[in-house]
Amino acid sequence: MNLHEYQGKEILQRYGVAIQTGIVAQSVAEAEAAWSQLGSGVVVIKAQIHAGGRGKGGGVKLAKNLDDVKTHAGNIIGMMLRTPQTPGGMEGPGKLVRKVLIAEDSYAPDFNACKEYYVSILMDREKKCNVIIYSTEGGMDIEAVAEHTPEKVQKEWVDPISGFQGFQARKIAFNLGLSGKAFKEFTTFITKLYTAFVASDASLFEINPCLRTGDDRILAVDAKVTIDDNALYRHPDLEAMRDKDEEDPTDVEAQEFELNYVKLDGNVGCMVNGAGLAMATMDIIKLSGGEPANFLDVGGTADAARVENAFKIILKDPAVKAILINIFGGIVRCDRVAQGVIDAYKNMGNISVPIIVRLQGTNADLAKKMIDESGLKVYSAIQLAEAAALVTKVLTEA
């Protein structure tokens, strides 16, 4: 679950991580009130969307007075912001900005005396531990730094048993070239940041920039935070931060139906029970000359309602030219799944793409007979090879 910058900073602040002070606003009037409350004169107005690179798309502006606040807040709130990380990139439709963060100017009074760093924490699955990635070259062009000068990006792995150690904090601060007050501030900063990461069950903390101010304070000027969905049951307060307006409507609908769904860029929709079978099904589709349009796991209870909801999700994708249903009848009987497919097909009444149903397991023969005799535009198969051949057939005829 992705969070907005202001929400990520709220989490950091709970654990004592120093942040750039700011107040969120959803209208120009609220932006004016936030400016007055901060009382700092110069502020930064930041669009709040689930995407990075906001400054490159005009979503971050410096306001030197109240008139600037009104102008920039008015222009940013309601705009379709395009960044390199929004769908389609700078040429795509962008994302609607519904709120902005009015933040203090942490670079004052001397911009040139400040220094930006990059710090992130995430899971290294290969090494099976968390890793802290950091660089002296923070800011908007960190991707270019990683691509062209990878030696400037360093990593520190954290043992899951012993946890983050003091010597590691000092090592990172030393590698960033810090000394004196800034060195001490950073060791405190990174230690608390790691504590917040673990305690909130996050899968990503990205602080870019992590700022050393002119008076050697260390602040999180930005915060990109992703929480592990599987841990949200432990954090109802964090789950309440979810912004469904920032998510794909199809993904939201799939979650409401308790379906495991991931959108892909292919032309054959998949409906499967079990993640392993779903991966094998996508392989079958590719071997048959198609491309999977989605990963969709209906789970162990593929009844009529669940199948119908899955159909609705798959058919929202206009690129889908066929649907392959691949169900193993272990917990659920194949004839019940077949009846679910038939009932869902009849209830929806507007399915225009061919459907291949491969059922294997308990009562598979009965299920095939039910589908074959249903009179519907549904092709049945028992073996994987049959299903693959049918996928090739319907794509050729499409």
Image (cartoon, rainbow, N blue to C red):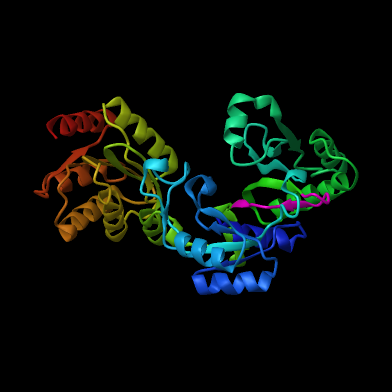
Image side of residue 128 versus residue 384, left or right: right
Give how far across and how far down residue 224 sits, in percent.
60, 50
Residue 239 visible at all: no
Q: Name which quarter of the figure residue 355 lies in.
A: top left
Residue 215 is a magenta residue = yes
Image side of residue 151 versus residue 260, left or right: right
Closer-to-camera residue (195/66): 66
Residue at the left extreme of this rendering? 375
Q: Count all numbered tags in the image, as a single digit.
A: 0
Image side of residue 185 versus residue 286, left or right: right
Q: Name which quarter of the figure residue 13 lies in.
A: bottom right
Range of magenta residues: 213-225
Closer-to-camera residue (161/131): 131
Prevailing secondary structure of the magenta residues? loop
Q: Residue at x 67, y 43 (%)?
A: 120
Closer-to-camera residue (317/220): 220
Residue 220 is a magenta residue = yes
Give how far across and how far down residue 254 sits, in percent.
38, 56
Give how far across and how far down residue 98 sits, in percent.
46, 63
Residue 230 visible at all: yes
